Amino acid sequence: MAAPYAFCYSTVMRSESVQYRIVGRDAASIGRSIERGVVRGELEAGEAIPSVRALARELGVSPSTVASAYRDLRHRGILVSHDRSRTVVAHRSPLAVRLAPELPDDCVDLASGNPDPLLLPDLGPALAAVGPVHRLYGDEPSVEALLELGRTDLVDDGIPADHLAVVGGALDGIERILEVHCRVGDRIAVEDPCYVGSIDLIRTLGLHPVPVPIDDAGPQPDALEEALADGVQALLLVPRAQNPTGAALTPERAAQLRDLLADHPEVVVIEDDHASWVSGTHHQRVSSDRQHWAVVRSVAKSLGPDLRVALLSGDAATVTRVLGRQRLGTGWVSHLLQRLAATVWRDALRDGTLREAAATYASRRDAVIDALAVHGIEAHGRSGLNVWIPVAEEVPVVQGLAARGWGVQAGEPFRLQAPPAIRVTSAALAPSQAAAFARDLAEVLDHRLGTRRG
Ligand SMILES: Cc1ncc(COP(=O)(O)O)c(C=O)c1O
């Protein structure tokens, strides 16, 4: 029955030559059409789709039909509405979409947010040391050697470790915590800008991210106070190596935030410590003395993203619920992975790999920031793998840098209300390249008069 739809279509303008036709006569078929476009990559992340009224007019259906289709896609995290008039395709929709196009071969990849593979521990000796032992249903979900390392590590940072779970990475832990504490429609305070994966996850769970602007020392107290006063169910923050800005909580800022949170004991505080041991700064805790809290400490940036292991510490109720929910689904994180992570971690502590990696990332960040300062370009990055550079317009700067051989990330996916910027993954940039990068960025900004800030 394709024929009746022939006259019921709308187009999404991407460029002058590419258009996607949305078709359908009812909410379900319109929704399926948009979903098809996203899966095929014909509707790209961030792309605006027509307003409810415009699409209704073009398809000859009522606005409430289109609104219903959009509502369903929003609840499923496929579309995102920034305001009443602008709905876009989510940056990481929960569909098996094509991956973003790769950078050209001759481009230096400063866009990925990845750790430098050369700074990750060698997996060889650990793989050889992890015995080929089968685990069966009914075994303990967590490997004691990993829990033991985790307990020592957390307690050294002043974080209680009486209740621990092993989860499949930071985002898996965050998703499980949000699921056990939040209901559809709840509001979650997040840093603005913040990790795009967290924003998309929150929206996909039917929750609403509430932006709390940050500076180099973390979330701004006035803004958090406002968000708390307006009512939020949870606060999600990254205590160090904040992605994308490189912010890290100072002891003073953490104390201010704890004071504010003390007036809102019902709020669940979640700390996403995704870069843990290579962030180059101490973990300042905000989640202490709370009824419901969690710290998720991932090995992803320190030991390797493919290990997919994170330790989740929290209050008894939170950890019990997370473990219970995990048991009903994946059951546990593979013991092979857990044992591998524990062995790599122990060896890396022993031979200083983690300390060395943290120092190298710090020197690479500093080299970029210092090189940019020579040209009067403001840049942020106290901690972690990235540097955040405010610009007046993102797209021309990203394009200008790509033309000069540098692949960087536009800030848009990370921002809720924060002003424009680009994210540069300094983890991958040798200090000897920093001056050339800064010179090229200065040239791009100078070519676009008025683009440069500060
Ligand atoms: C702030 C933040 N949280 C979480 C993650 C994902 O961590 P994991 O791979 O442990 O889920 C990332 C990845 O870059 C991140 O930047």
Image (cartoon, rainbow, N blue to C red):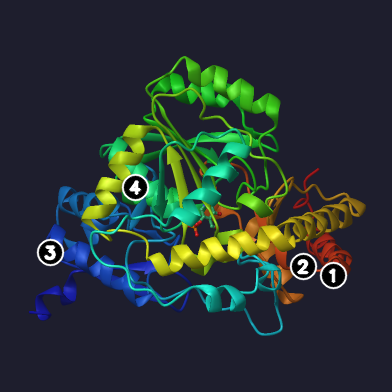
Q: Secondary structure at mark 4?
A: helix
Comparing labels 1 and 4, the label whose residue is closer to the camera: 4
Q: Which mark is residue 429?
A: 2
What is the crowding at mark 2: few (fewer than 14 residues within 10 Å), some, or many (at least 20)? Answer: many
Q: On the image, numbered disc 3 is attached to which residue? A: 25
Residue lying at the far top of the rendered structure? 263
* Badge 2 element: loop
Rendered residue at 65%/52% (across/down): 277
| SS under mark 3 | loop
**Which amino acid, by three-letter code, is at mark 4?**
Arg
Q: Amino acid at mark 3?
A: Arg
Report whether the residue tagged 1 is closer than 8 Å to ligand 1: no
Q: Residue 34's x, y, as percent?
A: 27, 66
**Mark 3 vs 4: CB contact within 8 A:** no
Q: Quadrant of the C terminus?
A: top right
* Residue tagged 1: 433
Residue at 87% from the left image edge and 69% from the top image edge: 436
Residue 356 in the image: x percent, y percent? 77, 60
Q: Earlier in the sequence, mark 1 or mark 3?
A: 3
Does residue 379 appear to the left or right of 322 in the view shown? right
Disc 2 to disc 4, C-alpha distance: 35 Å
Mark 1 and mark 3: Cα distance apart in space: 55 Å
Taking depth in this image into account, of 33 and 199 the one nearest to the observer is 199
Q: Is residue 19 visible?
A: yes
Mark 2 touches mark 1? (CB < 8 Å)? yes
Check disc 4 and report the residue beneath it.
176
